[in-house]
Structure formats: C-alpha cells, structure tokens
Amino acid sequence: MRDRFSRERWLAVSPLLDHALELTVEERGPWLSSLRAEDESLTKDLEMLLEQHRDLQAQGFLDSGPSGRELELGDKGFDDEFHVTGPHTFVRALLDAPTRRLLRSLLLEADLTVVRGQVSARVAVTTTWALHEFALARMLGYLLQVARHFERPQDLVERLASNARLDPLPEVRLQNLLTLVREYPEEPVTQEALVAASADASDWIRVRAATALGERGRATLLEVAGRDPGDDAAASQAVTVLGRSLDPERVREILARALRNRQQGIARACLAALGEGSRGDEVALMSKVMSMEKGDLAVAAADALGSTGSPAAEPPLLAALERDIPDLRVAAARALGRVGTAAAVVPLKEAEVRAADSVFSRAARQAIALIQSRLPGASPGQLSMASGEAGTLSLVEDERGRLSLPADHDRQ
C-alpha cells in the first residue's frame, strides 16, 4: 500500500477526504461504495487516508490544534487565542461567556490545552518557590472552576437559548440562535428564543429572528426597515425580506432617506423592491437614481429597471448606454435584454462598437438575442433593417442570420 502521493494524486483525493470526514459513519459507507464503482483506485487511496486519520484520532493527535476543523464562536478575542473543534452544537452550548472568560484568564497564567474535556496546564517556574506555590494554588483554583464549567449541560437546547439571550457579544448570541433554528426548529424553546431575539439590542439579530418567525416577525422587520438612521446591513435585509409586501410609498420614503444618508445597502434593497412591482412613477424614480449616481447604486437602478418589465424603462436604459461608466453600460444592456424592444437593437450594436469592451460586447449580444427571441415568429439572427424608418426592424423569412436592407432586394 502506498503511503505517499504525487501532487496530482493528492489534489484529486484531498477534496474527497474533506467530504468523507464531514459524513457520519452511516453515511460514509454507501458514499464510498458509489465512489468505488466510479474509481476503485482512488477509493482505495481514500480509505487508506481515513484509516490513518482514525489511528491519529485514537492517539489524541487530532483533538486540538490546527489539524482539526475549527469552530468560530463569534468572540474574536477568544477565537484568536483558542483553536476550538468538536460537535458545534455542544461546543457553542458549553462555551458561554463566563467559561470563555475563565479560559482566557487561565491562558494568561499557563500553557493551556483542553482535549476531550480534559484540561491540562503547564506552568513555568520563573519566580521563587514560595511565589510559585502561590501561583500554582491560584492555577488549581482556576482549573477546578473550568472543570465545573465543562460539565455537560443537562439541557443542551436550554443552554443554547440562554446563550442566545444573555451572551454580551452579538455575534455569539446570533450563532447560538442560528444553531437552535437549524438543529431544533420545532422545539418550543427555539420559538421562545426567536421571540426574545426579535427584541435584541442588535438590529441584525432582530432581523434574523423576525425572518425565522415569518408573519409574526413582520412588525419587527417594518420597524428596523424604517428606522432613521438605520443599520445599513440590517435594514437592507429587512427591506429584502419584506419585498413586495412593503407598501411602495413606504419604500420610496426609505429610499429617499437612504440616499440622503448614503446608505447604499438600504438603497439597493429599496431599488430592487421597487423593481419587483413598479408603476410608471417608480420607473421615473429609478431612472432618476440611475442618471444621478455613478457607482453601485446606478448599477442597482439599472437592474431594477430591468425587473419592471415596463416599456417605459427602455428610454432611460438606452441613455445609460451613452455614459462612460463600464459597469453601468453592462447593467443597462443586461436590463434591455429583459425589457428592450426591437428599437434597442441598433443602439446596442452602436454602443458595442464604441465600447470595444469584451464584457460589454457579450452583454450586448445576449441582450440582442433575448430581444429577438421575443419578436413574433423570430429566431436569433433573423433581423434586417427596414427602409424609411430609422431604428425599426423587420424579419428576414428566407435567409437565416442575414442582416440586409429591403432596398437591396428592390435593386436585385
């Protein structure tokens, strides 16, 4: 049996090893069987690595340190100082704020390792023996406290809910809440935790909880979306979740405030919401934003205009093709592919020639193909210039892919 791999062989087997280690023992057997049917040699190499992994794990080499799959709790100071592995549900429940604080204090005093729930600390002798005995006694006190904290919680779900409610760090509260929602969605404790989290001090946690609560969380979403000034990430997510159910007049108010405060996340979410169910006056508003802005908001406005399905969106999008903003031109072409008529084909071709940009060329060609596909009886490439009316198009019935002037046929 080989115990070394070429670089190419390792690149082939490494992703499979990562996947196999994520599976349970029950899942891994059938998966290996199906893999063996496809590539028996590769499966043998993988099984050899899995056997070596089991041997190392049995010896305790894979319980901590950089070789394990690390969990981040959301406490940056703790996550930077400790490499944490293990069942994520149990780990998050166990490492509440007091336990993390205690472990960090202990780490200041000693070289600390925790393997399979067993805590060991090595203290270097750097003082007189009397002072060292005093430090050692204090260390033993810390270790006893850690041991008490490491007792398995009697109710894992309750501990997660408590952490989601009481931890001083928002990201830790959120991770415990999300663990409850993923792992124990039907538990009454989870529903109670979501209701409590919808009143959290963090707007982002409130939005995540309100989203999981569905209709019961609508009032919270409306409150976060309408706050002035709002948290950009939280309010934009609230607007996105509310979507079409949010009154258009309310969306316009939030958009105006976001533009004034330069909160681009909220503004982008509002533009997307307006694009989903817009009327003529909203097309005008999105067109105004697109014409006044230069960066991501102009692009977002163009995308929103493309979502309207309204013929009124075509003129401002054609105007955007003239602006010297590459990302906006691409977005305008993409939007014209959704709402443009035959009148947009020539401007798209002219803009493609002017731009000399491969990204825009691809977007323009795709837009033209989509426009053509919507014309009655059309197939891509069956367009010709109609004489007498600039910018109008007619179908060529006989020669697929030929672009010609009808006057040419008259001369033939």
Image (spheres, rainbow, N blue to C red):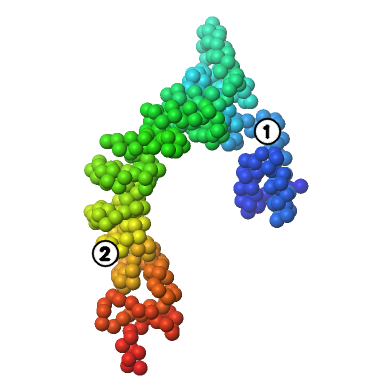
Say whether residue 233 is left or right of residue 132.
left
Q: Residue at x 27, y 36 (%)?
A: 228
Tally of numbered discs: 2
In this view, the residue in front, 22 or 50, is 22
Q: Residue furthest bottom?
A: 412
Residue 267, compared with residue 228, is above or below; it is below
In this view, the residue in front, 259 or 354, is 259
Q: Which numbered disc, 2 or 1, marks the residue that appears first in the sequence? A: 1
Residue 13, compared with residue 224, is above or below; it is below
Say whether residue 113 is left or right of residue 47.
left
In what element is the residue under mark 1? helix
Kind of residue at badge 1: Gln
Disc number placed over residue 315 in the picture, else none = 2
Q: Residue at x 70, y 56 (%)?
A: 38
> How much space separates mark 2 and mark 1, taking CA atoms?
66 Å
Disc number placed over residue 57 in the picture, else none = 1
In this view, the residue in front, 265 or 240, is 240
Residue 159 in the image: x percent, y percent? Answer: 53, 23
